[in-house]
Each structure stands twice: as structure tokens, then as C-alpha cells.
Image (spheres, rainbow, N blue to C red):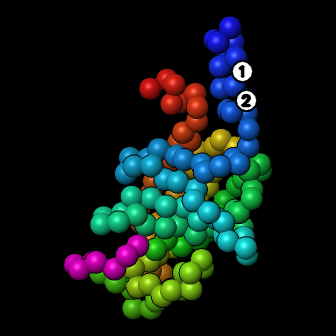
Amino acid sequence: MRTPVSALLCLSLVALPALADEVWTTPIGDVVYEDETDDGWAVWSYPGLDARGTVYLKDLAGVYEGRGAYAGIWVEPESPGIELCDVAVTNPATGESHYNWGRVDIVFTEPDFPGGWVALRGNCFNDPSDYLIGKPVTAMTEQEQ
């Protein structure tokens, strides 16, 4: 009897919307949907050089269906040897100023949870020069591993 019950439990977890943190696997490590701000920013974290970086995506907070393209910023801690921006950006969640930041554009490859995405990133005000592909981690992908 355990097999059908655990299978039903697993299927119900996969079908649930993103009520908890979403996680995507990428070539640089896992990207995690950490939090949301009151004014509509989704807060993600990702592996950085010395510490986890943070991505803030405007108008993605609370959106689990009909996802499309979102613009935002990334912020990483200032570290020796890293070229900093001439202008600081204010962190949307904490209000702190950062000189190690840039623009990011994310496009979801599937409109509904769980969906993958492609991110384009640039330093400071520069056009995006790097890309990253995220694939959703679900209960099924964890079982397959």
C-alpha cells in the first residue's frame, strides 16, 4: 500500500503551484526563488564568485502562470579585483547601495510553473553579454537522478 500512496503524494507535489521556493539547475549551480517584496519584485539567489548573488525581477512576484519576459537587476558583494560600476544601485529589498551590479532580462521557456528560463546579463548599464539557462528542479527530476 505504500507505493500508491507515495506515488499520489509525489504527483500532488508536482502539480502544486510554486507555493514554496522554486529551484532551477544551471551550469553555475542552483538558482533559488528566495522571496518577494511588497512592491512586486521576485528575489532570486545564485552562486557568485565569493558569495551568493541576488537577482531582483520586477513584476514576477506571485506570478506562477502566464510567465513571459521580465527585466531586473543582479547584485553581488563587492570583492577585491572586481571592476565596480561608476554608479551605485539601490537594492530593492534592503535599500542598501551596491557598486557591483548589472541589468538582467529573463524569458521563461514555458509560461506556467514549473518552467525553465533563459537569462541575459550585463554589467552596470552595459548591454547583456552573458547568458544562463535554468531548468526547473521538480520532485520528478530529483527522483530521476
Residue 24 covered by magenta stretch: no
Image label count: 2
- Label annotation for residue 92: none
Image x and y of residue 12, in percent: 73, 29
Residue reaching furthest bottom?
87
Do callouts 2 and 1 mark residues in contact (Cβ within 8 Å)? Answer: yes
- Label annotation for residue 12: 2
SS of the residue under disc 1: helix
- Classify 114 as above or below 72: above
Magenta-tinted stretch: 76-82
- Using residue 140 as the reference point, say whether residue 25 is left or right of it: left
For label 2, count other residues whose C-alpha is less than 10 Å away and answer few (under 14), some (14-19) or many (20+).
few
- Using residue 117 as the reference point, say whether residue 133 is left or right of it: left
Q: Main secondary structure of the magenta part?
A: loop
Residue reaching furthest top?
1
Q: Looking at numbered disc 1 in the image, what kind of residue is underneath it?
A: Leu
Image x and y of residue 47, in percent: 39, 58
- Classify 15 as above or below 127: above
The one nearer the camera, 76 or 10, is: 10
Per the image, the residue denoted by label 1 is: 8
Going 29% across and 81% down the picture, which residue do you hit? 83
- Using residue 9 as the reference point, say whether residue 121 is left or right of it: left
Going 58% across and 56% down the picture, which residue do you hit? 33
Asked whether residue 61 appears in the rendered view, the answer is yes
In whole angstroms, how far apart are the C-alphas of marks 2 and 1? 6 Å
Image x and y of residue 144, in percent: 49, 23
Residue 81 covered by magenta stretch: yes
For label 1, count other residues whose C-alpha is less than 10 Å away and answer few (under 14), some (14-19) or many (20+).
few
- Using residue 105 as the reference point, say whether residue 68 is left or right of it: right
Asked whether residue 133 appears in the rendered view, the answer is no
Quarter of the view holding residue 87: bottom left
SS of the residue under disc 2: helix
